[in-house]
Image (tube, rainbow, N blue to C red):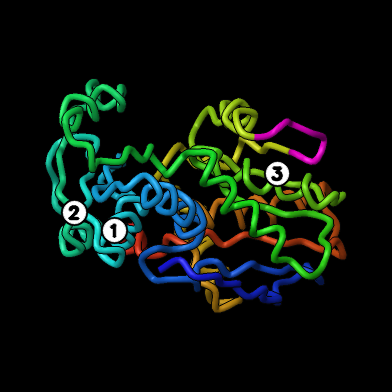
C-alpha cells in the first residue's frame, strides 16, 4: 500500500513573496494525508515484520491521525482500534474512522494520560495487537518524515512546518542534517506552551543551529482559532487557491507572513512550506467560517 510516492512542490503567488513554495503532501492521499502517510509508512512495515494484525492507537475526537490509521489498516487488511480522548461524541472524523472499521473506545482524560497502561489493560493478552502512539510518534515515523527532505531537488533558505507532537519536525531536522544542508528549519507549535517540542525532537535527532522554534502562533492552543486566523485562511485561499486547515497549516502560513513583516525572512528568500494535509478537519469547523 505504501509504495514510493513523491509529492509535488508548487510555487505560490503571494505578495510580497517572490520565492514561496509549498511541498504538497496534502495531495498524497485524501485520508492517509500528508505527514500521516509519512509516519505510518514505516510503522506499518514494522508491524508487518512482527506479524501484528491489529493496530491500536490514540487521539482526540478530531484527530487526522485516527482517520489515517483507520484507512491504512483497512487497505492493509488489518484491524484497528483507537482510544479516543474525552466523552463519547459523534463527528465527521469519527464517522470516517468507523466506516473504515475502526473500533472506538472513549476514554476519560485522566486514564488517557497513561497510554501504555491503557494498551496493557485491553490488549496485554492479544499477541496480534500493535501499539501506535498518539500522532504516530516513533523512530519509524521520523524516518518517513526525513524523506521529505531527500525528495527535494532544490535548496531552500527556509523550510517551515507546523508541529503537534514534534515527530515530523524531528524527521525534517534529521533529513536536513543527513543531506548536509544549510537550510533553516522553522517549526510552528500549534499548542500553547509548545517549547516542549524541542525536547521531543531531541529524542530522535541531535538539536542543531538549523532549528528555530516559534512559539507565538498557537492562536489559543490546539484546535483553537481566532477571527484573525479565520480571516487569514479566507484571504490566503482566495489569493492562492490553496486550502489550509485551521489546526496546523493555517498557523504555519500565518507565521511565514508575520515573520516576513517583522524582518526575520526576506521577500526574496527561498521558502518552502510543508503542507501536512489534514484538510478533512475543516468539516468540523463549519461554524467558524
**Secondary structure under the numbered disc 1 in the rendered image:** helix
Which mark lies nearer to you, 3 or 1? 1
**Secondary structure under the numbered disc 2 in the rendered image:** loop
Figure quadrant of residue 107: top left
Disc 1 + disc 2, Cβ < 8 Å? yes
**Secondary structure under the numbered disc 3 in the rendered image:** helix
Q: Is residue 50 above or below residue 126?
A: below
Residue at which label 3 appears: 173
**Of 73 and 89, the residue lying toward us:** 73
User: For the magenta stretch, what is the residue range?
Assistant: 205-211
Looking at the rendered image, the quarter that the C terminus falls into is bottom left
Residue at which label 1 appears: 73
Residue 5, horizontal then vertical, whole percent: 56, 72
The local crowd at label 2, few if under 14, some if 14 to 19, many if 20 or more residues have their Cα within 10 Å, is many
Q: Is residue 205 above or below residue 230?
A: above
Q: Which mark is residue 108?
A: none
Of pointers 2 and 3, the one earlier in the residue sequence: 2
Residue at which label 2 appears: 102
Amino acid at each position: 500500500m505504501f509504495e514510493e510516492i513523491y509529492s509535488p512542490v508548487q510555487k505560490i503567488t503571494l505578495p510580497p513573496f517572490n520565492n514561496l513554495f509549498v511541498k504538497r503532501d496534502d495531495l498524497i492521499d485524501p485520508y492517509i494525508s500528508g505527514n500521516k502517510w509519512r509516519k505510518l509508512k514505516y510503522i506499518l512495515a514494522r508491524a508487518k515484520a512482527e506479524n501484528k494484525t491489529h493496530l491500536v492507537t490514540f487521539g482526540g475526537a478530531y484527530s487526522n491521525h485516527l482517520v489515517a490509521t483507520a484507512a491504512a489498516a483497512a487497505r492493509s487488511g488489518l484491524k484497528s482500534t483507537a482510544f479516543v480522548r474525552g466523552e463519547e461524541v459523534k463527528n465527521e472524523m469519527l464517522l470516517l474512522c468507523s466506516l473504515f472499521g475502526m473500533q472506538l473506545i472513549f476514554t476519560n482524560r485522566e486514564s488517557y494520560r497513561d497510554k501504555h497502561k491503557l494498551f496493557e489493560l485491553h490488549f496485554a493478552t492479544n499477541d496480534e495487537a500493535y501499539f501506535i502512539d498518539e500522532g504516530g510518534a516513533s523512530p519509524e515515523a521520523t524516518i518517513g518524515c526525513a524523506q521529505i527532505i531527500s525528495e527535494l531537488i532544490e535548496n531552500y533558505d527556509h523550510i517551515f512546518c507546523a508541529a503537534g507532537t514534534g515527530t515530523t519536525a524531528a524527521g525534517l531536522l534529521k533529513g536536513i542534517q543527513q543531506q548536509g544542508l544549510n537550510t533553516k528549519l522553522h517549526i510552528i507549535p500549534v499548542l500553547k506552551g509548545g517549547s516542549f517540542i524541542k525536547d521531543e525532537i531531541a529524542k530522535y535527532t541531535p538539536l542543531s543551529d538549523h532549528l528555530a522554534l516559534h512559539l507565538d502562533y498557537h492562536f489559543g492552543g490546539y484546535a483553537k482559532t481566532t477571527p484573525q486566523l479565520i480571516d487569514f485562511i479566507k484571504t490566503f485561499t482566495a489569493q492562492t487557491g490553496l486550502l489550509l486547515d485551521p489546526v496546523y497549516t493555517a498557523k504555519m502560513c500565518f507565521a511565514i507572513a508575520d515573520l516576513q513583516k517583522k524582518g526575520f525572512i526576506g521577500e526574496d528568500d527561498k521558502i518552502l512550506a510543508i503542507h501536512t494535509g489534514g484538510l478533512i478537519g475543516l468539516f468540523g469547523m463549519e461554524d467558524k467560517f
